Image (tube, grey):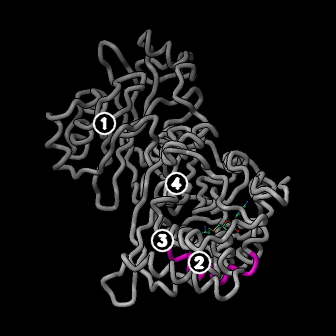
Amino acid sequence: MMSAMTTTWDAADFDAFERSGWKGRGEAYASGFARLTAHTVEPLLDAAGVTAASAVLDVGTGPGVVAAAALARGAQVTAVDASPEMAALAAAACPGAAVHTAILPELPFPDHSFDAVVGNFVINHLGDAQAGLAELQRVLRPGGRIALTCWEREAMRATAVFGEAVTAVGIPQPDDLPSSGPFLAGSDDRTASFRELLADAGFTGAQARRESWTHRVDPDAWWSAVVSGTPLTGSLIARQPEAVTAEIKRHYDALVAPYAGEATGTVALPAVALLATGRKEPRHPLSTDEVLDIVDAEDNVIGQATRGEATARRLRHRCVFILARDADDRIFVHRRTPEKLVFPSMHDMFVGGVVGAGEGYDEAAKREAEEELGVSGLSPVPLFRFLYESPEHTWWSAVYEAGATTAVAPQVEEVAWHAFLTEAELADRLTEWEWVPDGLDAWHRLNAWRTGRPTAD
Ligand SMILES: C[S@@+](CC[C@H](N)C(=O)[O-])C[C@H]1O[C@@H](n2cnc3c(N)ncnc32)[C@H](O)[C@@H]1O
């Protein structure tokens, strides 16, 4: 426990401070600070692959800005906040969402409840971030994505000016307020530390990046928003005698003055956040131990073998190829990762992979397309099948087409690079790039199939 004479805060102390710190601040937060946090809402939802078909959890929803944006995408939204006051604001703002008062790291949901979990500036409010991440991973379905933001403190002028103004006045840190949260405390490279935190929590393909923007605001309105709507520096300022508050405000005015905006009476304050993302290990890991059905030249099942064995011994098995098109009818094209068992680092105009033992082609097409593109709710349409044969490989290949009309979040274990190309752009690159031979074969057959010409087999 924290001693009254020290400023050492353990996780339980920090959580207790958070529980009391937001009381009475919901409305002020919603009308002030939430305008700053709104900037990362869409990148956060994109990073988590949230689409109309996703069941998404917005954790620490506050007044529900992320939840509202997820609803606007057509997602099925659940939102929680530790503060009943915030949960009530979110419920009022998001009538289409299921909103609960719940506190990380204990959420009232069964395992694997959500396709995506998002938290906008919440992980930095937890006493024990690792415990919070473990709980978020528990409620995420295998293959689902998590995306979280936190502040990049020093570069974050929009809030740093308040701490600097307090320091300039020389107010001692009171024992009942932490000077800052424990999240990534002491890290020299917070981007790398944030990524490592997700990787250590077991998320695959963990990544973190900076998001920078300019917060344009009336400086007096921003002062009021932070002082009345935030629990740390804001509440420290709010509790000072009037004369001290006025002195802090004078320092604040001087600190923001160099950021005078183009519009009269505004400042343009640099804001920097970190956005980290990762994926829960899919149910079908990229494994050489995966068992496949082995088929004959007529596609009848004649046995089973592991994927490694099938590849090594050229045993005929089954694959699915899905041509994914965006809303502008462009084709999803990608370069495979160097770790792939076959055709590493080559380009492909299809997503897809092997069909598991006992699995149907349609089932595999949906699974592979959703996992590889990082979206849910796809309905691949079967087009035709053909037998792919080369001296090294042979597989029955079922070709599909699917609309991927919302933001994709490709699986980093499979996709090293991606873009959506028009058919003309793709045609230009057919001789320029090295393509997977089975995909290239499927592409030529698809074009022939479309024009009604017979294929080679
Ligand atoms: C900075 S606000 C972010 C609100 C909102 N996500 C946004 O983008 O503006 C942090 C929110 O996290 C909530 N929070 C803090 N600790 C929490 C916990 N352990 N479990 C759930 N919510 C928590 C707070 O009550 C507060 O509403």
Residue at mark 3 to residue at mark 2: CA–CA distance: 10 Å
Residue extending furthest toward the front: 170
Q: Is residue 370 above or below residue 386?
A: below
Provide the residue designation for mark 2. 226
Q: Nearer the viewer, residue 135 or 299?
A: 135
Residue found at x 47% / y 82%: 253
Describe the element under mark 2 as helix, strand or loop: helix
Q: Provide the residue span drawn in magenta.
A: 23-37
Residue found at x 62% / y 42%: 142
Q: Is residue 179 visible?
A: yes
Q: Quadrant of the C terminus?
A: top left
For the residue carrying disc 2, how many other residues have a C-alpha within 10 Å: few (<14), some (14-19), or many (20+)?
Answer: many
Q: Is residue 69 visible?
A: no
Provide the residue designation for mark 1. 348
Residue 28 lies in the magenta-colored region: yes
Residue 162 lies in what quarter of the image?
A: bottom right
Residue at mark 4 to residue at mark 1: CA–CA distance: 24 Å
- In percent of width and height, residue 365 lies at 47, 41
* N-terminal-most mark, 3 or 1: 3
| CB-based contact (under 8 Å), mark 4 and mark 2 | no
Residue 268 lies in what quarter of the image?
A: bottom left
Residue found at x 79% / y 56%: 6
